[in-house]
Image: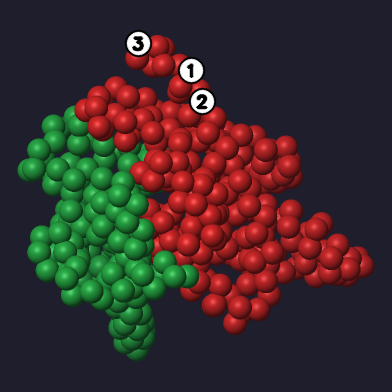
């Protein structure tokens, strides 16, 4: 337990916060890489997921692909791309972001198509009957009703990315993982544990925030569907 | 290919290490999730707590968990036990919900018939609930198996030997082939484990296919 006390002391020590290698900088880096990767994955996976859900096409491929990606070890994928693309200061960010985004694609994809599929077909037919175009149906009916599940997918993707960004520190990518990996060779256990605690707290905080947002969205979409019932 | 042949001995040794670390979490998460899932299925309040807990557990990143556990367990940081415990926790986090939903999905009329023909609650669990919950449990276990095998390699970052060693070593030497061997090895292991689970399911749950053919015939 004394290790935990030492780690907490390490975290609250003001000397460990400023500077590029300080806790503050690492925290910002970690969030920045994570955001970048989730955005990249979202740009690819969200339209694709909505399309799969709307048309019902390509579902088997999406499921198979997600399963295959789960078996791929993220550390292996990271190191492979880093070496294959050539690692430099600029070289690190790109492969890391790509791998993080690749990991974030399946949950976002699944959330989007499962969310759209779960919508009562009568609602979609009704929208078609009142003369909405397919595009209007997707943006005006399916996206709002599927919003809680879409956000659920984004939530698990974000968690996955925050967790894997810790591993990406091994490639020289910044972020909180650096605190753990820098502490390892010099056996600076308080620093390693501090890094571990900070990443864990960050993951739980982000998860909590997105869960709250998801609950609010669910409430809103339930209200919306009650509205349409009348 | 030549590298893989020249280093076949090391590949085999690390593969075995990988398997030795991966099997206990897979088995333990099944064994622990069944009673937990049953408990959650019976009591809504416990269900909420367990599912929230497993959600939080699953939100923990693996590398930090490998570092925190030795402090909690009093083990040394390089001890593979840390990785085994961490992966068991993840496995349970994945499986508890599946197990609870698997028991929920058992048809109520079947359960009532079992009571009607005189099954005690214990008999009913072993002869009706558990066998009927088998297929979804197996599906959940296949997910746990794939994710566990993939996560074992992260242990390489703190020096626990597995196929993940090829990732760290290959990265240090900028040697793509070695990393590829590690990735292919992990994927092959995942496929072998999956095939074994499916095979085990066929042997242990023969009624699944029997029901399938009957519905197909009808």
User: Which of the chains bears the disc numbered 1?
Assistant: B
Ranked by sequence position, the earlier of labels 1 and 3 is: 3
The local crowd at label 1, few if under 14, some if 14 to 19, many if 20 or more residues have their Cα within 10 Å, is few
Tell me, by letter, which chain the rendering colours green: A
Tell me, by letter, which chain the rendering colours red: B
Q: CA distance from mark 1 to mark 3?
A: 13 Å
From the image, which quarter does the N terminus of chain B lie in? top left
Dot 1 falls on a residue whose secondary structure is: helix
The structure residue drawn at horizontal position 48% and vertical position 17%, both measured from the top left corner, is B9
Residue closest to the far left: A90
The structure residue drawn at horizontal position 45% and vertical position 51%, both measured from the top left corner, is B77
Residue B9: mark in rendering: 1
Relative height, residue B8 to residue A21 (above, below): above
Q: Are marks 1 and 3 in contact (CB under 8 Å)?
A: no
Dot 2 falls on a residue whose secondary structure is: helix
Ranked by sequence position, the earlier of labels 3 and 2 is: 3
Dot 3 falls on a residue whose secondary structure is: helix
Residue A217 figure quarter? bottom left
Relative height, residue B143 to residue B1 (above, below): below
In the rendering, at what x and y percent does residue B149 appear? Answer: 48, 41
Residue B163 figure quarter? top left
Q: Is residue A208 visible?
A: yes
The structure residue drawn at horizontal position 63% and vertical position 52%, both measured from the top left corner, is B28
Q: Which residue has dot 3 on it?
A: B2
Q: Are marks 2 and 1 in contact (CB under 8 Å)?
A: yes
Q: Which residue has dot 2 on it?
A: B13
Q: Is residue B94 visible?
A: no
């Amino acid at each position: 337990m004394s290790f935990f006390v030492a780690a907490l002391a390490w975290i609250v020590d003001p000397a460990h916060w400023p500077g590029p290698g300080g806790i503050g900088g690492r925290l910002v880096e970690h969030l920045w890489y994570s955001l970048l990767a989730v955005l990249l994955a979202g740009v690819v996976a969200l339209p694709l997921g909505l399309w799969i859900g709307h048309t019902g096409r390509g579902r088997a491929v999406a499921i198979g692909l997600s399963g295959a990606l789960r078996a791929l070890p993220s550390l292996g994928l990271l190191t492979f791309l880093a070496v294959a693309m050539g690692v430099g200061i600029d070289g690190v960010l790109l492969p890391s972001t790509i791998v993080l985004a690749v990991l974030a694609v399946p949950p976002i994809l699944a959330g989007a198509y499962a969310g759209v599929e779960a919508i009562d077909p009568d609602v979609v037919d009704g929208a078609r009957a009142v003369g909405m175009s397919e595009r209007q149906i997707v943006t005006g009916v399916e996206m709002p009703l599927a919003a809680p599940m879409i956000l659920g997918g984004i939530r698990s993707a974000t968690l996955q990315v925050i967790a894997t960004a810790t591993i990406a520190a091994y490639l020289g990518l910044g972020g909180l993982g650096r605190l753990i990996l820098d502490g390892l060779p010099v056996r600076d256990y308080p620093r390693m544990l501090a890094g571990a605690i900070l990443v864990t707290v960050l993951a739980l905080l982000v998860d909590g925030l997105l869960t709250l947002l998801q609950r609010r969205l669910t409430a809103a979409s339930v209200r919306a569907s009650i509205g349409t019932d009348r | 290919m030549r590298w893989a042949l020249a280093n076949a001995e090391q590949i085999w040794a690390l593969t075995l290490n990988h398997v030795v670390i991966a099997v206990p979490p897979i088995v333990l998460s099944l064994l622990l999730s069944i009673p937990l899932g049953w408990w959650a299925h019976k009591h809504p309040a416990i269900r909420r707590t367990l599912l929230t807990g497993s959600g939080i557990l699953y939100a923990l990143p693996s590398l930090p968990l490998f570092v925190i556990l030795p402090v909690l367990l009093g083990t040394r940081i390089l001890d593979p036990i840390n990785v085994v415990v961490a992966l068991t926790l993840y496995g349970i986090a994945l499986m508890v919900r599946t197990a609870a939903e698997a028991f929920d999905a058992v048809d109520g009329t079947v359960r009532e018939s079992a009571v009607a023909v005189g099954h005690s609650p214990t008999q009913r669990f072993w002869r009706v609930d558990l066998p009927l919950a088998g297929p979804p449990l197996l599906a959940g276990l296949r997910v746990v198996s794939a994710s566990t095998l993939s996560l074992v390699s992260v242990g390489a970052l703190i020096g626990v030997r597995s196929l993940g060693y090829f990732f760290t070593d290959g990265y240090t030497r900028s040697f793509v082939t070695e990393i590829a061997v590690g990735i292919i090895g992990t994927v092959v292991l995942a496929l072998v484990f999956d095939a074994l689970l499916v095979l085990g399911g066929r042997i242990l749950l023969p009624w699944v296919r029997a029901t399938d053919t009957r519905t197909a015939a009808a």
